[in-house]
Image (spheres, helix red, strand yellow):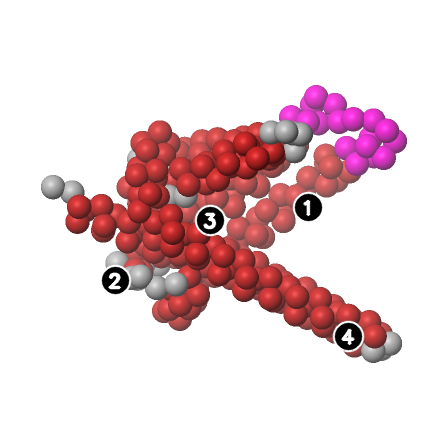
Amino acid sequence: MKLGIIRTTARVLRQRPGLLCFPVLGLSTVAAVLAASWPLLLQGIWYRVEHGGAPTQTQSAAIALVLWTAFALSGIFTAALLHSVHALLGGERLPLGASLRATGRRLPTLLSWSLLSLVAGSLLRTGESLAGLSTLFELLGFSWSLLTFFTLPVIVVEGRGIVASLRRSLSLGRRSLGRWVVGGLKLFLTTTLVVIGAIVVLILAVDSDSLAILFASFATVIAVMLLVTVVNSAAAGIYRTSLYRDAVASARQVSP
């Protein structure tokens, strides 16, 4: 199915709009983890920083645990989305609960992968801020993205371990690099246009000098941005799964 990211997403969501529940659940669980951490942890850290202090080692470790928990929960629901989309593109309409149960069977690998991905991403972002080395780490970041683009679909669909999934992801990624970049650019441009529209609405609301219009516009913009976040997450997962299926099919065709 060699369609662009917008058409692929629209086609899949028309067939199964319930798939949006996965990014909604992912966003909700991350928000719940952060909200629960505020009175227990983040408020104390914020107080220390405001008074010129630094987080203690225990607090730093707790922050890392909170971030990993949020990242892992988000990744689990993304994995369930990929599983459900893969089945749908193959002509099978699975119950959403079946995808969650299938993801649960991959839980140890998914948790390990989320930890590795979080650590690697943090190191790369830290390296990009270093003077004189930013370009090198940006290239490393792009290479890491290419290496890991299909890692999650491979884990979910093929049930491989992390190392085998990375190798498989790199092999498949070479076949889909161009479409991946083009799809990412289209999604970025579409999101940018929506954000610009939201900013324009807020500017017009402020100029109206009406408090009711301002509140209504602000609420509308918040709702739209949340919807865009959910749809973007679903679109990224749907398109990644579509590219994965195409790459696997292409690999089978060239295999002797």
Magenta span of residues: 44-62
Mark 1 falls on what kind of element? helix
Q: Residue at x 38, y 54 (%)?
A: 179
Q: Residues within 10 Å of mark 2 (few under 14, many from 20)?
A: few
Q: Please state, as top left, top right, bottom left or bottom right, where the N terminus lies in the image.
A: bottom left
Mark earlier in primary sequence (3, 4): 3
**Residue underneath mark 4:** 204
Kind of residue at badge 3? Phe
Cα distance in 3D space between marks 1 and 2: 39 Å
What label sits on residue 77 in the rendered view?
Answer: 3
Mark earlier in primary sequence (2, 4): 2
Cα distance in 3D space between marks 2 and 4: 47 Å
Based on the displayed image, in which of its 4 quarters is residue 156 positioned?
Answer: top left
**Residue underneath mark 2:** 91
**Residue underneath mark 1:** 35
Q: Residues within 10 Å of mark 1 (few under 14, many from 20)?
A: few
Kind of residue at badge 4? Leu
Cα distance in 3D space between marks 3 and 1: 19 Å
Mark earlier in primary sequence (1, 2): 1
